Image (cartoon, rainbow, N blue to C red):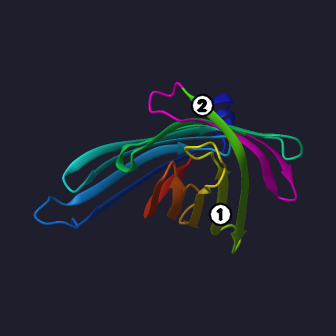
Amino acid sequence: MVLDSLLVGIMLFSSFAVRSPNVQPNPDDYEVSVGVSHSNYYINRQWERELGRKYIDDLVWAKWDDKSFLYFKPEYMDKQSQSVKYLKLDYRFPYSGATFGFTTRSTTDALNDYETFASVGISKKKTYRNDAIEVEISFDGYMPPDEVGDNTTFEYEDKFKVSWKLTDKVRVYNQGEVSKLKGNSYYKGKIGIEYNL
């Protein structure tokens, strides 16, 4: 009983993708992803091979959100496949369905130097057909300083997820992301499966 109450809301997820390489005669590209998801935390590891090179991508975050006063989210990302690595902390205030505040983020791969700048975010989730279909979108925008200290650049993370209920515990999902972070732009789409504990 105690274990059941601790596991409520935890979802295990996984996906696998294989594709032909853009440059021949490289071996097929692939991506294997596994993780744990909850409304208050997220842990994901991905193993990838692209153009013959192997990468490991990690994303870990925790979130505290009381919906009326403060949004607080520490996050660690090491996306070797896109050369993006940081440790950051979002602290924002909710207003009219969005969050407004600041982000403190590392500026070096050694995670020993930080800068603070304005940030905003919005996240929405809706279900359809008696919870059989779930749609979730999120957007985070950042105004980090450039090389001379001016806040003239805009960075963002735009994500969506659509999932379909197969059974009470199993869902199939389609997830996508379009991001520009630390000078790197990338997009990704994938299909996977989730198991709800």
Q: Residue at x 15, y 58 (%)?
A: 27
Q: Which mark is residue 114?
A: 2
Image side of residue 59 versus residue 120, left or right: left
* Residue nearer the viewer, 138 or 13: 138
* Residue nearer the viewer, 143 or 30: 143
Image side of residue 140 versus residue 108, left or right: right
Q: Are marks 2 and 1 in contact (CB under 8 Å)?
A: no
* Residue nearer the viewer, 177 or 17: 177
Whether residue 118 appears in magenta in the rendering, the answer is: no
Q: Residue at x 19, y 60 (%)?
A: 28
Q: Residue furthest bottom?
A: 129
Q: Residue at x 53, y 35 (%)?
A: 107
Q: Secondary structure at mark 1?
A: strand
Image position, residue 4 (x, y; %)? 64, 36
Q: Which residue is mark 1?
A: 137
Residues shaded magenta? 91-112
Image position, residue 79 (x, y; %)? 42, 44
Image position, residue 88 (x, y; %)? 60, 36
Three-letter amino acid code at the position of disc 2: Tyr
Q: CA distance from mark 2 to mark 1?
A: 28 Å
